[in-house]
Image (cartoon, rainbow, N blue to C red):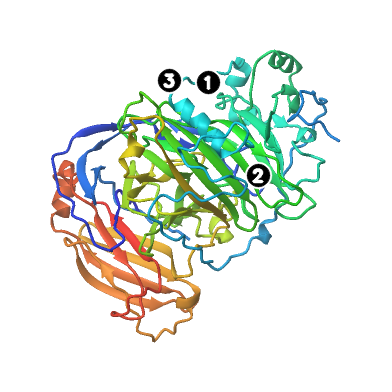
Amino acid sequence: MNLAFRSFTPEGTLPAFPASPAAKSVLSAVLACTLLAGGCAVQPAPPPPAPKINHAAAVFAEAPVIVGPILIPKPKPAPAPVKKKPAAPAKPAVQQKKPSDESQTAQTQTVSADKHKSQQPSAAPVPAQTQQIAQPVMPGDPAVSAGDPASPDAPFGLAHVTDLARKLAAEPFSAPQMTLPDTLRKMSHEQWNQLRFRDENTLWRGENLPFEVQFFHPGSVYTTPVKISVVENGKVQPVAFSPDMFAIADPELVTALRELPLDFAGLRLLFPLHGEAHKDEVASFLGATFFRALGQDCGYGLSALGLTVDTASASGEEIPWFREFWLVKPAPGASTLTLYALMDSPSQTGAYTFTLTPGEKTLMDVRCTLFARSGAKSGHKLGIAPMSSMFLSGGGVKEDGTPIPEIHNSDGLLLRADNGQWTWTPLENPKRLAFHAYALPNPRGFGLMQRDNVAGHYSLHPAAYDLRPSLWVEPLGDWGDGHLELIEIPSKTEIHNNIIAFWIPESPRIFAADDAQAGVSYAYRLYWMQAGVAPHSLGRVDDTRATMNAEEGTADFTVHFAGEEINAIPADTGLSCPVELPPEAALVGKQLTKDPETGGWTLSFQVKLPKEEGLLKTILPNMRQTLPPLQFRAVLKRGENIPDPLTETWLFDLQR
């Protein structure tokens, strides 16, 4: 189903959408990242696929649509909806010793698909609200605000990185350059993937530490230098790059690379996620500000980013990147690893702390302090806690009876509002660019989820999509006013990430700072969870079907709810299922039935669409572009007058 625009308000009211004359605007540089076919299967040893910027411009009509106080362009309508189913080794860190040229097989994560089990949803803690943006102390970090300078005698920590970001923001932007031979620069991703880090050069190997680190070689699309250092006992020791750290088949290329001032492209973190016998890859940072992590029995899927700037803006997107990392050496037996990062872009700089805690659910506490670059133009749209994923198909059957396989890394967006309301909306591979906005002040959480963890639903595709993780963002403290944006990009192949979501603050000082010393901080926790695991215990939407009958001017919806509590409710119980319609539509019929096989509940209803739909669709297609979508909501309750819901709220926009 093509959901071309969604407007979410936690109070459950439908906002007004005033019409206005359409104007043309060009949307360029929409962010996406490339995923190799099958590259996110169970074994994560191959490096994460290349981030890629989609520079294809998309033109859309710009009829303003009001979502609370936000003025957002309204996109063109999409074609008729389609079905969607959610469901004593060398230590390169401290010396420039060149290791031997012996070839080494890269590590792989040994996880069997039959280990993966469906899990009941687990409740996530709700952070206490505060009057100001929270500044929690991360493990291993001193408390520091944007204005606190680092003491020259203090051990290296977040305050030092914050000082670097503040000073960088006061300087004109200068993109770092790295001279690469054409052999590296013109490599395909598959060729670059063969530049494997030699296992014997793994950082901290043989030191009886829980974490180890490997590095990525520059080449292909990874041409931005990344400096990496180790922090031990508060002192910084740079990691010196050497091509001899990597297995490179061409000896002449190795000789040439030794003469060049190169740096790394990124890093991967290893941890015994499935037992002490083997260290698995548990996270990676590679390309721009992309990073990914894994929980137990998961394969790589969606990615997170440190920041987005002007994504889906007519001015074009700006791409920030992490230019330097500092790895804090862990103690023996440590369960967490802390690393700092310095972010840079033409208009913004930032200091980041990542505290990684691997486990069944791998947690990552993130704290960032952002600075507007002095002299940069104002009005930038900053995306906080961004994430990027892929949705190609939700499955189904073609008209000729041919089955359509499910192919996706995520199948829906889950939101938790400040008032505690949970809302679910399914993802879609649209026929055209689809832009969605949700008014979401003081968010309690949001994430792109892989809800369907049934291996059989992906049986027609070789990749283990049932092992792709969900990613849930839990803000730490009160973020203030803002909204969440979801962008869906048309795609014909699973190698491209075509879904991106991020939260945008309303605070004026985050959009423009007159003083480069003025920074703003955000803190949040990322949960990298197995597919099928949810951060709440309510009944969940696990299937949505919608069909339109153009001749009769009707639309039929089928929504399936499932969960431990509602599955246990007897069929003869009189549950309430309020359906909220837009004023232009009329309810023709509604039915709620219990599935005797699964125990879940199916809501079916039909609506009569506005009478002008047929006329506008056949005679005035351009006028249809200015019309708002038709928004539908539904939720299950124990009774009409009982306020507490049994399920999350289903939210669906029908594009005209």
Residue 176: assigned label: 1
The kind of residue on which mark 3 rests is: Pro
**Whole-percent x, y for residue 523 in the image:** 48, 48
> How many numbered circles does the render carry?
3
Q: Is residue 584 above or below residue 208?
A: below
Q: Circle 2 is placed at which residue position?
A: 44
Residue 34 seen in render? no
Looking at the image, do the residues carrying marks 1 and 2 touch, with CB atoms under 8 Å apart?
A: no
Q: Say which label, 2 or 3, has the lower sequence index.
A: 2
The kind of residue on which mark 1 rests is: Pro
Residue sitting at x 33%, y 44%: 434
Q: 434 or 72, which lies in front?
A: 72
**Whole-percent x, y for residue 46 in the image:** 66, 38
Relative horizontal placement of residue 10, taking residue 454 as reference (left or right): left
The answer for how far apart the CA atoms under marks 1 and 2 are is: 29 Å
Residue 482 seen in render? yes
Tell me the quarter of the image containing the N terminus: bottom left
The answer for how far apart the CA atoms under marks 2 and 3 are is: 39 Å
Circle 3: element type: loop
The kind of residue on which mark 2 rests is: Pro
**Whole-percent x, y for residue 519 in the image:** 42, 37
Q: Circle 3 is placed at which residue position?
A: 172
